[in-house]
Amino acid sequence: MIDLRLLREDPDRVRASQRARGEDVDVVDALLSADERRRSSSVRFDELRSEQKSLGKLIPKATGDEKAELLKRAGELSAAVKAADAEQNEAAEEAQRLLLQIGNIVHPDVPRGGEDDFVVLETVGTPRDFAAEGFEPRDHLELGQTLGAIDVERGAKVSGSRFYYLTGVGALLELALVNAAIAQATAAGFTPMLTPALVKPRAMEGTGFLGQAAQDVYRLDNDDLYLVGTSEVPLAAYHMDEIIDADQLPLRYAGFSPCFRREAGTYGKDTRGIFRVHQFDKVEMFSYIAPEDAEAEHARLLEWEKQWLTSLELPFQVIDTATGDLGSSASRKFDCEAWIPTQGKYRELTSTSNCNEFQSRRLSVRMRDGKNVKPLATLNGTLCAVPRTIVALLENHQQADGSVRVPEVLRPYLGGREFLEPVAK
């Protein structure tokens, strides 16, 4: 959540951020009003309690009419204290409810607009000219079926649409990707983590996934637990309610977990194959760092993502995501989009977000710097979202005979294979 002091001192900045996101601006004024009620009722409560305590010392010493008058006043004060306490609690609850509706303050350099208003920062590599090579590229599903690697028909039979099986070399390819990604992250100083796929409501709310993203979240009503859409959630909540010494920072974790997303609002979009699915595995980078170092860490996370995609020999572009496509927790987000030959465009493979102190305030993760205790910054970055990476690998490295060349970085994890070969039918 945002710092309430910022709201009080510069409400126009908060209004401008909400407006840039395409979110409700009126909630800012409603929060200012609730915060003022909370503070004034708190002052009123303290004044009444102080008078009540003073009166309590006078009553034992009083006699006769004076004592009767004091007792009468004590009764009135008792009722007033209860009313003031109820008022401050109600105002505090209202302020907290409204505070959770306000997104992170947008970084001033983020391009304004919606999903299509991003700015391309860099293009790496050149898409292959399949026409010059003399053949028409096949899409990832056709290739996956030829290789005996992907089975969406039985996935739909067993679980419904947007589910799939990875079989044979498809399963081995996932394991190779995960192992190679974890190896890169470990070499960069990340601690590997296998994280829970089910979390409590506070973990999900604390990371910002019960706001605008709530429609994509799976919930187990009987258990009051949520299935995570990314290991960012359990990694952010790992140090919930803790104070971390400044000399321990940065803390960097590389989490591997299954991820679950409803993909609400995407009816009819990316229905073929495994590009947009309800369940997938992912390796996610997560950093806890001092707030003043957050922007530099954001740049490092992006470089690690670029290193990964370059090692997979994929052509890609880096974009600065526009305000309307940020997500409530991010102040700025960079996406790496790989070229998908059969779609003729770049599609998102990784993203990295700077959440500043937004999540740590919600989850009460703080740092101790000398005598000062303050919220720290959190950042996240996808290293490998498996199905989309498989899509990009199959399509970009396919050969005319239906085989797929294996990038060198993955060969040690695939028994030295240089090519994935079609299976005999």
Image (spheres, rainbow, N blue to C red):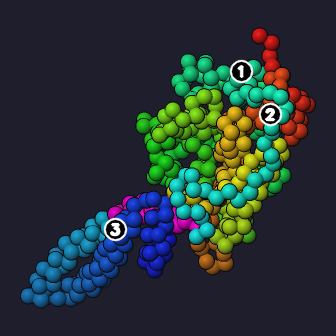
Closer to the camera in the image, 246 or 271 = 271
Residue 2 rendering spot, x and y as whole percentages: 50, 67
Q: Residues within 10 Å of mark 3 (few under 14, many from 20)?
A: some
Secondary structure of the residue carrying numbered label 2: helix
* Image position of 206 with respect to 193: above or below: below
Residue 30, which numbered label? Answer: 3
Which comes sooner in the sequence, label 3 or label 2?
3
- Depth check: give the residue in front, 134 or 237: 134
Image quarter (top left, top right, bottom left or bottom right) of the C terminus: top right
Q: CA distance from mark 3 to mark 2?
A: 57 Å
Q: Earlier in the sequence, mark 3 or mark 1?
A: 3
* Picture residue at 71% right of the left edge, 21% below the top: 145
Between 119 and 354, the one nearer to me in the picture: 119
Task: Tell me the magenta residue range.
Answer: 92-107
Report whether 335 appears left or right of 304: left
The numbered dot on residue 145 is 1
Find out whether residue 96 is within the magenta segment. Answer: yes
Q: Is residue 9 above or below residue 338?
A: below
Return the x and y of residue 12 as percentages of the image width and height. Answer: 44, 75
Three-letter amino acid code of the residue under disc 2: Phe
